[in-house]
Image (spheres, rainbow, N blue to C red):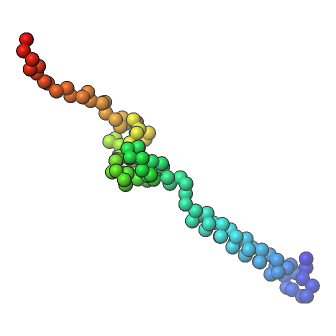
Amino acid sequence: MFCESGCSGGWLFSEWIMPGVLLLVLLAGTAWLLNRRTPSTLSAAGNCPHCGGPVQQAYFRCPHCGDELKHNCPGCSRVVDQAWDFCPFCRAALKTETQQPVTSMTTDQSTP
């Protein structure tokens, strides 16, 4: 444990502790770099609901068909998902009431 050859500190600092710390730093740095370079599985959101093409969570429009995947809330302007009915941030209604389809005013051409 002690240096018998007349070391000033008395401990084997340079022989065991410094190489151990250096090795630990190198291993931790390597692990951090490998973890950082691994592609995240959370970035993939799935498929476009319109065309089925692969899309990522950050996409606002589908790169395959151009369908809108997200839009801004009319109340707070935050990005919200296209499928949501209400904004989770300001509680604003995102989908307006569905309008009734306009029926054409056709006249009956048959004679009575």
**Residue 32 located left or right of residue 109:** right
Residue at image position (61%, 68%) is: 33
Within the image, what quadrant is residue 92 found in? Answer: top left
Count all numbered tags in the image, as a single digit: 0
Residue at image position (41%, 43%) is: 49
In the rendered view, would you say 101 is above or below 7?
above
Within the image, what quadrant is residue 90 found in? Answer: top left
**Residue 67 located left or right of residue 105:** right
**Residue 16 located left or right of residue 22:** right
In the rendered view, would you say 101 is above or below 21?
above
**Residue 6 located left or right of residue 24:** right
Residue placed farthest to the bottom in the image? 5
Residue at image position (55%, 57%) is: 40
Q: Position of residue 26 (x, y in %)?
A: 69, 73
Within the image, what quadrant is residue 110 found in? Answer: top left
In the rendered view, would you say 84 is above or below 7?
above
Residue 70 shows up from this direction: no
Q: Position of residue 19 (x, y in %)?
A: 77, 77
Residue 1 shows up from this direction: yes
Residue at image position (38%, 46%) is: 51
Q: Position of residue 45 (x, y in %)?
A: 48, 49
> Nearest the camera: 97 or 7?
97
Quadrant assignment for the N terminus: bottom right
Residue placed farthest to the top in the image? 112
Quadrant assignment for the C terminus: top left
Q: Position of residue 101 (x, y in %)?
A: 24, 28
> Nearest the camera: 53 or 87?
53
